[in-house]
Image (cartoon, rainbow, N blue to C red):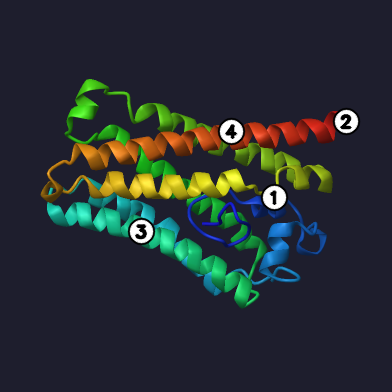
Amino acid sequence: MRSEDGAKRGCFSDDNDQQTRLLAPDQIPPSPSMQHCSDKPTDKLLTLPTVLTLGRVAAVPLLISTFYVDSWWGTTATTSTFIAAAITDWLDGYLARKMRLGSVFGAFLDPVADKLMVAATLVLLCTRPLEVNVFEQVPWLMTVPSIAIIGREITMSAVREWAASQNSKLLEAVAVNNLGKWKTAMQMTALTILLATRDRSLGGSDTLVASGVVLLYISAWLAIWSLIVYMGKIWKVLFR
């Protein structure tokens, strides 16, 4: 999953590189994210980073199936799957940069894998809330940030695909920013905490759950704010 920090940088986040999938390899504009992968993206369909990305896509059904296993090992497997996906997200980015294995197919697939994993996790947590006081008092507590995050990701994907069909100035307008990096960090931490606290051995700790929910709301706010920033940049390009 490509990160907000550019091609193959990891952790379930935005990626400007999906824009390149609409163009032939020799027509790809020199976007900053692809430049970090290599001087020219490879035409190979399967590279090591891409295989890792495919592994994250394959992990989504595993995440869903283990989530509904009502035992300690189900919770452990779900949380471990999510953490492993985050690690491979960073790892494939590292390999793409260091080994110059960035590819057009990988650039397209990476953000798809990110969004599948994050959206699946959010939906799962909404359909089966934790049995703690905070959720009993406010049943929609998880729903609001989940809708905000998923809605933002869908919107940004559409905007970037449109920008990819326009010109290089619009591509630059939707280049990654620091807000996205912070959003990703908050989002990953929040979802890991919320998945882990489903383990009954933690006693359904209200404190841990509350910290996860707070971080999720912060990541949702950063997601919406970064979308506003992107739209502002696009507006300047179109109407200046």
Disc nearer the start of the sequence (1/3): 1
Q: What amino acid is found at the position of numbered circle 3 in the picture?
A: Ile
Residue 83 marker: 3
Disc nearer the start of the sequence (1/4): 1
Looking at this view, name the residue that lies furthest to the right: 240
Disc nearer the start of the sequence (2/4): 4
The Cα atoms of the two marked residues, 2 and 1, are separated by 23 Å
Q: Residue at x 52, y 32 (%)?
A: 151
Mark toward the viewer: 1 or 4: 4
Discs 2, 3 touching: Cβ within 8 Å: no
Q: Position of residue 104 (x, y in %)?
A: 67, 62
Mark toward the viewer: 1 or 3: 3
Q: Quadrant of residue 190?
A: top left
Numbered disc 4: secondary structure: helix
Q: In the drawing, does residue 221 fall left or right of residue 105?
A: left
Q: What amino acid is found at the position of numbered circle 4 in the picture?
A: Trp
Q: What amino acid is found at the position of numbered circle 2 in the picture?
A: Arg
Q: What amino acid is found at the position of numbered circle 1 in the picture?
A: Gln
Discs 2, 1 touching: Cβ within 8 Å: no
Numbered disc 2: secondary structure: loop
Task: Report which residue position mark 2 lands on.
Answer: 240
Task: Report which residue position mark 4 lands on.
Answer: 225
Q: Position of residue 150 (x, y in %)?
A: 48, 36
Q: Quadrant of residue 144?
A: top left
Task: Report which residue position mark 1 lands on.
Answer: 19
Disc nearer the start of the sequence (3/4): 3
